Amino acid sequence: MKAIGQYLPDLLQRVEALRAQGATQTPKKPSAEDSPAFDCPLCRDEGIIFYPERNLAVECKCQERKRVQRMLKSSNISEEFVHKTFDTFDVQSVDVRVAEAYKLVKEYSDTLVARVKKGQGLQGVPWLGILGKSGSGKTHLSTAAVVPLIELGVQPVFFNWVSGFTEWMAYYNIPDEAYKVDEIRKRLYNCEILIVDDVCKESQKDTWVKEFYGIVDFRYRKGLPIIYTSEYFEDLIGFLSEATAGRLFEKSRSAKTGKKYIGQMFLGAEEDPLLLNYRFKDLV
Ligand SMILES: [Zn+2]
């Protein structure tokens, strides 16, 4: 075995050589290669891993994850919602109505997943309504229904009634951005599956209701599914018009089996108003 001292002269020489080199070069700008901060250390964000000894290049496993993340972003589903899956929904200690809605939504989602796996699209599938009191888990269930589809490459669009329409209408007031209205409308009209969360919440402005009719009617005629959630049920007829609500309800029934896909989590008049609200769970 050689003592460490024997390596030393060689090492010192190399350090000197590097120094000399450094002195004659302009400082290098930090590049991606210098930065240790890669999202994926496996492929250093190249997306591909090379195995030169086997003359082989394979796609890195981070790519699938990144595809899903990109799709979530363009679906308007925030990181926070990605975790709203069937697994994270507490179905053990909830009211029977919530458990029933869970079952219905899970079955609906499974049916869609099976279709996509068989290479059939989503055109012609029934629509899904998730209706109920605030806090009963409507948004969680609607997100849980589509996350497995996203993993299969389906691109849903998530549209929140209040924030979505507020943003939409704001574009009309920015002269250079009015064209974005058409982009939004096109996406909502044509996407593979649309989720409209909290229909009629807070406001039923004429402009909103009219635009919503356009979306519903277009998708109704094209057989493109909508998942809608709302705190209202019968009231939707008054708020939206019979034409719009009628199309929503009519489509939420399987043409094949007649099964109704409207989950209902409402209270009786005598019941504790907070009974179905998970935010107050264990407090009431
Ligand atoms: Zn990678």
Image: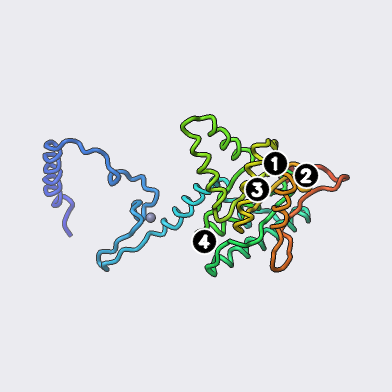
Reading the chain from its start, which is encountered first: label 2 or label 1? 1
Query: Could you give the CA–CA distance between mark 4 and mark 2, rounded to whole angstroms?
Result: 36 Å
Circle 1 crowding by C-alpha within 10 Å: few under 14, some 14–19, many from 20: many
Reading the chain from its start, which is encountered first: label 3 or label 2? 3
Corner quadrant of residue 134: top right
User: Do the residues bearing badges 3 and 4 touch, measured as CB atoms within 8 Å?
Assistant: no
Instruction: Indicate the amino acid at tag 3.
Output: Thr
Position of residue 180 in the picture relative to residue 85 (left or right): left
**Residue 261 position in % (x across, y down):** 71, 59
Reading the chain from its start, which is encountered first: label 3 or label 4? 3
Residue displayed at 11% across by 47% down:
9
Position of residue 156 in the picture relative to residue 13 (left or right): right
Query: Could you give the CA–CA distance between mark 3 and mark 4, rounded to whole angstroms?
Result: 21 Å
Residue displayed at 28% across by 44% down:
34
Q: Which mark is residue 200?
A: 1
Instruction: Indicate the amino acid at tag 2.
Output: Asp
Nearest the viewer among 168 and 215 is 215
Circle 4 crowding by C-alpha within 10 Å: few under 14, some 14–19, many from 20: few
User: Do the residues bearing badges 1 and 4 touch, measured as CB atoms within 8 Å?
Assistant: no
Q: Secondary structure at mark 2?
A: helix
- Report the residue marked by disc 4: 152
Q: Secondary structure at mark 4?
A: loop
Mark 4 near ligand 1 (CB under 8 Å)?
no
Q: Depth-wise, is mark 1 or mark 4 nearer the camera?
A: 1
**Residue 21 position in % (x across, y down):** 12, 41
Query: Could you give the CA–CA distance between mark 3 and mark 2, rounded to whole angstroms?
Result: 19 Å
**Residue 209 appears in the figure:** yes
- Report the residue marked by disc 3: 139
